[in-house]
Amino acid sequence: MASKLSAREALADSVRKTGQSGAAIFVRINSDADLQFDDASAACRAGAYGLVIPKVRTVEGLDQLAAHLAPLEHEAGHDPMPFIGLIEDPGAVFDARTVAAHDRVLGLALGSEDFATVMGAEPTPDVLQLPKFLVHMAAKAHGKLSFGLLRSIADYADSSAMQMAAMEAKAFGFDGTTCVHPSAVPFLNAGFSPTEAECAWAKRLLAEADRATSENRGAFAFEGRMVDAPVLSRARAILAKAGRDGDND
């Protein structure tokens, strides 16, 4: 308990230092009801961008937290703080779509270790795959972000495996992941970022789409496959994520 309170007291300094390069800082608050509201208040006053909320079970809990924060945000001139909800028990997995619909929820993730513990299971990829996909689809159903790997993030020391897991998760549409140690950040960023080959493909495709439009062709073939609107949207999303456009190298 003492360490939790000291961490809360240090928030103003830690948020300032961590965000000094422009990062959007999310503070993970405690799940304990006796600590959660005070943690959220401290994070708001410290200038954190949003909150990571463990053991989310119901929208009522999110409503209560949002109601608690609203006057503090108004007083501080702080925009409403977005929430990243951690789903960590089987019942919450089945309610994840309702949670994802909450207007404060920016994204969802499955808390692998806690979920496996509640299930009496080991956090292996086989155990985690189904619940992670359910939470992932719940988030995407409401246009929210989805975070996670199809494995536990606890084994951060295996950098090669973690980067491969990030690439796998990206292929399934996950937007990123949490991590337990800063040493994992570079190879997780690399795994989730568009590759040079993906960017090159997207630029070639969009250039061909421009030619098709100029020639009044409604549909066209590109590298052996027919192209429709979803394929074009995917190409634009790749370049947007890479911070590029179709006209620049």
Image (cartoon, helix red, strand yellow):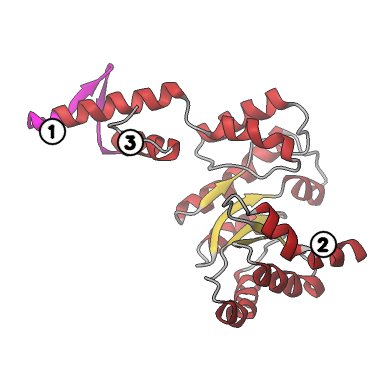
**CA gap, disc 1 and disc 2:** 57 Å
178 relative position to 218: left or right: right
141 relative position to 215: left or right: right
**CA gap, disc 1 and disc 3:** 18 Å
Three-letter amino acid code of the residue under disc 1: Thr
Determine whether the residue tagged by mark 2 lies in a helix, strand or loop.
helix
Q: Residue furthest left?
A: 216
Using the image, tell me which numbered label, if any, was put on residue 213: 1
Badge 1 density bin: few <14, some 14–19, many ≥20, Cα 10 Å: few
Determine whether the residue tagged by mark 1 lies in a helix, strand or loop.
helix
Tell me the magenta residue range: 212-230
Q: Quadrant of the C terminus?
A: top left
Q: Earlier in the sequence, mark 1 or mark 3?
A: 1
Using the image, tell me which numbered label, if any, was put on residue 183: none
The residue labelled by disc 2 is 7
Please name the residue shown 28% across and 26% down the image.
205
**In this orientation, which residue lies closer to the viewer: 74 or 228?**
74
**In this orientation, which residue lies closer to the viewer: 98 or 25?**
25
Q: Is residue 11 above or below residue 78?
A: above
Three-letter amino acid code of the residue under disc 3: Asp
Q: Is residue 165 above or below residue 52?
A: above
Instruction: State how many labels appear.
Output: 3
In x, y percent, where is residue 111? 71, 49
Three-letter amino acid code of the residue under disc 2: Ala
In x, y percent, where is residue 13? 74, 61
Residue 50 shown in magenta? no
The residue labelled by disc 3 is 245
214 relative position to 202: left or right: left
Q: Is residue 70 above or below residue 99?
A: below
